[in-house]
Amino acid sequence: MDYKIFQLVNQFAGKSGILDNLMIGLAKYGVLLMALPLLYMWFKGDESKKKVALLSLLSMAIALLINQLIGHIYFRQRPFAFHEVNLLLAKSADPSFPSDHSAFVFAIAWLLLFKDKRIGSLALGLAMLVGISRIFVGTHYPGDVLGGATVGLATAVFVWKLRAVFDPITSFLIGIARKLKLA
């Protein structure tokens, strides 16, 4: 079923220059676009939103660490290793499961959603587009993206539940940023 859904999405790759370029851009640089909602929370938000921006970065870091551990325990080949794929990006030797890109963007998006429904919903929509783009360009199966999204959600919930524990650290960092006129 994973491969069938992969085929359903990947079959459109290589057919439209505009769509291909959009998906390549999202697949490669979508993680950088997540900086936009974080910057908004940091510069336009009150202290609690600044803290959530910092907690989002922590959630993302933990998600990537968990992904690395999973990748060392369970190595799943990328789709192009076994199937004919419309591959729009260079081949990667990294494990396919779970998707690092998905873990990264979903860890941030979910945490933003917990604090601000509007910004979080936009971030979650962007995260979904990044996940779909990774399938479209031929680098991940849907299960890889779902796995990354699940890791991202789990770390976001973990960090959100423990936000009071991290409060002294986020307050300290915000204080330093204010002194440096970065907040």
Image: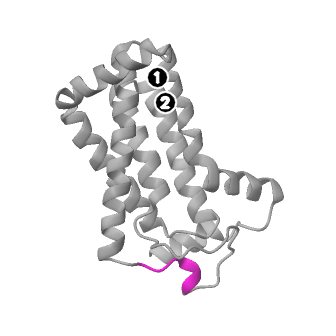
Can residue 49 be spotted in the picture? no
Q: Is residue 114 left or right of residue 29?
A: left
User: Residue at 30% of width from left, 66% of height from top?
Assistant: 69
Q: Is residue 60 above or below residue 65?
A: above
Residue 109 screen position, x and y as percent:
43, 39
Query: At label 1, which amino acid type do we have?
Result: Met
Q: CA distance from mark 1 to mark 2?
A: 5 Å
In percent of width and height, residue 48 lies at 33, 17
Name the image quarter holding the N terminus.
bottom left
Choose top left, top right, bottom left or bottom right for residue 9.
Answer: bottom right
Tell me if residue 77 is in the magenta stretch. Answer: yes
The residue shown at (52%, 40%) is: 125
What range is drawn magenta here? 76-81
From the viewer's side, name the closer residue of 137 and 47.
47
Amino acid bearing label 2: Leu
Q: Secondary structure at mark 2?
A: helix
Q: Is residue 144 above or below residue 79?
A: above
Label 1 crowd (10 A; few <14 / some 14-19 / many >=20): many
Q: Which residue is mark 1?
A: 41
The circle on residue 148 is: none
Q: Which mark is residue 38?
A: 2
